[in-house]
Amino acid sequence: MISKPISDLDAYDAAEPRRPRLSRPDLRPTLTWILPPLVALVLLAVAVELWVRLGDVSIWLMPRPTSVIESFFVDFGRYFNEGLKTLAVSLGGLAIGTAAATLLAAGVAHSNILERAVLPIAIMVKVTPVVALIPLFIIWLGHGWNPKIAIAALITYFPVLINAIAGFRDIDPRMHDFFRSVNASTWEIFRHLRWPAAVPYLFASLKISVTLSLIGAVVAEFFLSGQGGLGAVIWIEQNSLRLEQVFASVLMLTIIGMTLSTAVVVAERLFSWRLDQPVTAS
Amino acid sequence: MIKHPIEPDAEPAVRLDQVRLTYEAKTGNQLDAVDATTLTVRAGEMTALVGPSGCGKTSLLRIIAGLTPPSDGDVTVFGQPPAVAQRHKRLGLVFQEPALLAWRSVADNIRLGLQLNPRETHSSTDIDELIEIVGLRGFERYRPSELSGGMQQRVALARALAIDPPLLLLDEPFAALDEITREQMRYELQRLWGISHDPSEPPRSAIFVTHSVPEAVAIADRVLVMSPRPGRIIADIPISTPRPRQPEHEHSDRFINDTAIVRAALRSPTTPAVPLDAA
């Protein structure tokens, strides 16, 4: 049965068989990326410090960077705990918003009628300032975590929806023909073709949504300062003009935001090609 | 080497009866892509379809594959509508571009056809053996992007063959390759065409769309020449060179003579070089 494999063609084609990747990552490029902004940040802090001290700026207007850092470390437990609450709201909203948007996008990608019905509504919600809905959400969902999570979800879902629709539709038409030629089901086409094709799109939208969800969480916490969170801390402290605490809270939010963004990038590298793990047959 | 017995009495692999395809163009005009085409492809036959660009060769192939419904006329594949052939996974498609799943390894791309619609996986082609035959041993775990164009196209060929289809539909499969690889692939296709074929199925047939005349003559048992749009089959030229054919055959008088006949048919679309009913 087996005729000989064409070795001359092999030699022609496989001129350089290479098995790339998995070498130890080189840290130097990372350093050249991190170092300049870090230095710039330190210089900026020094400049502000000098300006506040030498210009005799009132601490009611601008706290000294050193006192902000002092507050940050002295009260670290507080910022950390309140930060966890904000993080929880943000992640909860992100999870719900992303899941709902992905499901909806899967439907829209398969049906033009659904697209025409759903997309205008989605855009209507998108152009409405979500903050304006917070009082309504409080009336509907009470004063607990729910309205905050709902706001974070609402603010994240739109970029995911638009990107996921584009992703589910970004399939090679020849590939689609091949699936049809073996009578693959709509589910099989989704599972093995549309879904993996959409993964890069989903990660791109997640990079946007992850910071949006944090914005949603903080703004909602302004309104619902009773349950804490960094938004509540900022709101309460600015009422008593304690700007060190406000700035320290902002610093904690920055750290959370950077952590989340980095987590998305790392997750993308880890999972992007693994989502279509085939059932290893035969 | 496997023989490809053409069985004149068996159920034909493909039968087209007065098939037409008309598009509604954006301007609102009716555009005829395929004009009243009647054609029979016998079981075990390798048929090449040649014609100028845009003459409807690809449309015809898509109609046979059940991917585009004809505007008019009847299509049967092994005596049944193309949808039945799809359901039983009796069609092996290869396109001009390899069209592989970028996120899957070579082996998992080849396995794709077996994995989809799994209840209809009639005979289990040994994937390992197939990889060996198409010359991809050692590259099983590579991603398609790490392979050359010729190797990618061999993955696509192996993917089509993995479901052991009694009908191969090849749409200019080597057109995107460089000339050297392309000429080698002709003979590789001839070799791969008959491998590991389920004896309960009809002998494997193939329809090979190309606009290279030498390629058609080198590969096919029969060359069908299509007219410019709207496409019609204007000549049906048998190529009787025995198999297995070797690359050296391309220098023979017989080969040169056959290509001359096909070229003549392409040049004078109104006067068939060989009457249609002669075959």
Image: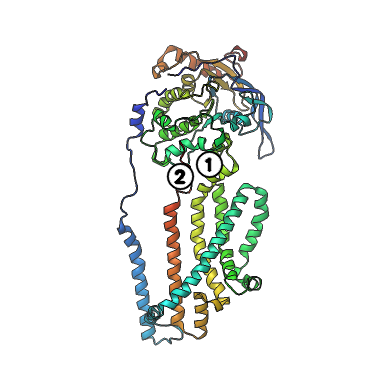
Q: Position of residue A200 (x, y in %)?
A: 48, 52
Provide the secondary structure element on which disc 1 rests.
loop
Of B102 and B231, nearer the camera is: B102
Mark number for residue B103? 2
> Eyeballing the image, is A224 above or below B1?
below
Amino acid type, label 2: Trp
Is the C-beta separation of discs 1 and 2 under 8 Å?
A: no
Chain ID for label 1? A
Residue A257's spot in the image, x, y percent?
45, 67
Q: Which mark is residue A172?
A: 1
The amino acid pointed to by label 1 is Asp
- In the rendered image, residue B4, in percent from the top left (x then y), is placed at 49, 18
**Residue at image location 64% in from the left, 56% down from the top:** A119
Snapshot quadrant of residue B63: top right
Q: Residue at point 41% right, 86% down?
A: A57
In the foreground, B16 or A104: A104
Closer to viewer: mark 1 or mark 2: 2
Q: Name the spot of residue A81 as percent of width and height, x first.
A: 46, 74
Residue at 63% over, 60% down: A123
